[in-house]
């Protein structure tokens, strides 16, 4: 028990000395004391305890018993303990609501830009939402995928040439055949690659003669019959593709126009590749049209108060009515006379227009196309129909430009003998109908 009391006394003395040292340190940093210290202030005296290390002593109240005090006292003490300092609290940086909103907005903007780019890239690869427009490009010999991509970009076929090069490498694009191609802006990367790749087998050619006066549906059937391209591809490409020709801009934007390019595929003898792209076929025929229908012919039509579209419309009727150039110019005079006298002869009453309305328009559009059919039927509508009823040849076009000078307003022909009868008056026409066995 005595030993325990001795240990307790030593511990108490040590704790008292530490407290005194801390108070002395605080006093050293405080303001200088007054001449007489306040009551209760004292200076601790240092006296070494018997058989203990020399430390300052000051008696205070004895702390309560506890094992924790004994354990702390058993540790060796360093009398040269450095001055203690209060631990500094770390500053917590708080971000304001405004900054937080700014960070979120920036993050969302970055994500949005990335998403837009990804969508545009995918759209470019797949040609999503692109218009149907025919584009003619020339691929040189030994062109790399990157060079081909640049050519496609220059012609508005793609937007990212570097991506085309990546896809071409991933898809193992075959050897490219140099030459000129008619491509469509709605073609995706893989379709573009397939269109310019060399075929393993040499392409076969076929000679096709397109007679004057065929309708577009008849030309399409002829292409399929000769294994050039399918009739559906031919007509779909015609209807849904924007072709880059000056004359197309002059075609009226008429809701009653049945086939926009009826009359513009020039009838002739052509050499096509078998299983060819329909755009190549159409473009070849249109190129021929621009060579055959010259600027001087268009200017002559304008001098007579006709547009190219009206010229072709009239020529298509003449083409369907007359079998030869002699009768073409006479038939042309009848229609010119009626067109120049609309108050007395408002309707052309051309039988081929009635046939076109029935066999082409009504058969395809049904009852919904009745308004269009009536506009083409010159027994129902006044003046020229909205567009050509076939694809006329040069003789019919020239006849429309250069009609014979007559006073005829009527004509008819014997269906067996092909003989034509012309009249100035309705009475004469009635007599001619009897002669032609049409009455």
Image (cartoon, rainbow, N blue to C red):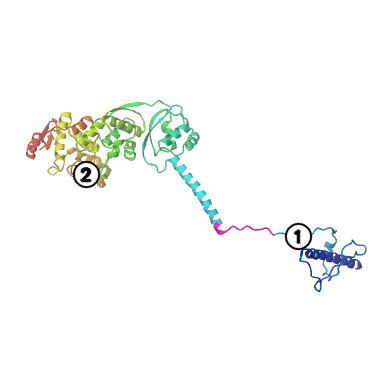
Is residue 295 located in the magenta-colored stretch of the structure?
no
**Residue 39 place in picture, x, y as percent:** 81, 74
For the magenta stretch, what is the residue range?
89-98
Q: Horizontally, is 32 left or right of 367 in the view?
A: right
Question: Pointer 2: residues within 10 angstroms few (<14), some, or many (20+)?
Answer: many
Residue at horizontal 33 percent and vertical 40 percent from the top:
240
* Residue with the mark numbered 2: 375
Residue at horizontal 20 percent and vertical 34 percent from the top:
320
Query: Which residue is farthest front?
Result: 35
Question: Pointer 1: residues within 10 angstroms few (<14), some, or many (20+)?
Answer: few
**Residue 346 place in picture, x, y as percent:** 15, 43
Regarding mark 1 in the picture, which secondary structure is present there?
A: loop
Q: Horizontally, is 208 left or right of 126 in the view?
A: left
* Residue with the mark numbered 1: 85
> In this rendering, does residue 67 appear at all?
no
Query: Which residue is farthest bottom?
Result: 39
Quarter of the image that includes the N terminus? bottom right
Q: Which mark is residue 267?
A: none
**Mark positioned earlier in the residue sequence (2 or 1):** 1
Quarter of the image that includes the C terminus? top left
**Residue 223 place in picture, x, y as percent:** 31, 32
């Amino acid at each position: 028990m005595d030993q325990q009391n001795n240990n307790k006394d030593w511990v108490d003395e040590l704790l008292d000395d530490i407290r005194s040292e801390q108070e002395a340190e605080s006093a050293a940093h405080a303001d200088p004391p007054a001449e007489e210290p306040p009551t209760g202030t004292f200076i601790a005296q240092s006296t070494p305890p018997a058989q203990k290390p020399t430390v300052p002593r000051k008696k205070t109240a004895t702390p309560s018993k506890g094992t924790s005090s004994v354990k702390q006292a058993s540790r060796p003490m360093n009398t040269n303990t450095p001055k203690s300092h209060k631990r500094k609290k770390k500053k917590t940086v708080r971000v304001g609501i405004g900054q937080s909103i700014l960070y979120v907005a920036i993050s969302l903007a970055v994500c949005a830009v990335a998403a837009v780019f990804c969508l545009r890239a995918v759209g470019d690869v797949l040609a999503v939402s692109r218009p149907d427009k025919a584009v003619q490009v020339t691929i040189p010999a030994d062109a790399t995928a990157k060079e081909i991509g640049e050519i496609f970009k220059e012609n508005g076929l793609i937007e990212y040439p570097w991506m085309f090069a990546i896809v071409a490498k991933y898809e193992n694009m075959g050897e490219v055949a140099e030459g000129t191609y008619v491509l469509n802006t709605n073609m995706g990367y893989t379709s573009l690659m397939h269109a310019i790749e060399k075929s393993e087998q040499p392409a076969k050619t076929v000679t096709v003669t397109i007679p004057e006066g065929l309708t577009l549906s008849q030309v399409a059937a002829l292409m399929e019959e000769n294994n050039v391209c399918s009739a559906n591809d031919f007509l779909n490409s015609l209807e849904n593709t924007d072709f880059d020709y000056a004359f197309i801009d002059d075609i009226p934007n008429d809701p009653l126009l049945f086939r926009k390019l009826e009359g513009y595929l020039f009838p002739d003898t052509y050499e096509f590749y078998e299983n060819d792209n329909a755009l190549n076929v159409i473009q070849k025929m249109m190129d021929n049209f621009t060579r055959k229908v010259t600027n001087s012919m268009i200017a002559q039509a304008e001098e007579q108060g006709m547009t190219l579209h009206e010229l072709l419309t009239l020529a298509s009727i003449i083409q369907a009515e007359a079998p030869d150039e002699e009768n073409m110019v006479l038939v042309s005079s009848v229609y010119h006379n009626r067109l120049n006298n609309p108050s007395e002869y408002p309707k052309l009453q051309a039988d081929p227009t009635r046939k076109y309305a029935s066999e082409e328009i009504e058969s395809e559009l049904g009852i919904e196309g009745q308004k269009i059919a009536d506009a083409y039927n010159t027994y129902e509508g006044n003046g020229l129909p909205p567009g050509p009823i076939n694809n006329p040849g040069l003789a019919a076009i020239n006849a429309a430009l250069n009609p014979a000078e007559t006073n005829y307003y009527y004509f008819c022909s014997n269906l067996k003998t092909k003989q034509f009868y012309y009249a100035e008056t309705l009475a004469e026409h009635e007599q001619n109908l009897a002669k032609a066995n049409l009455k």
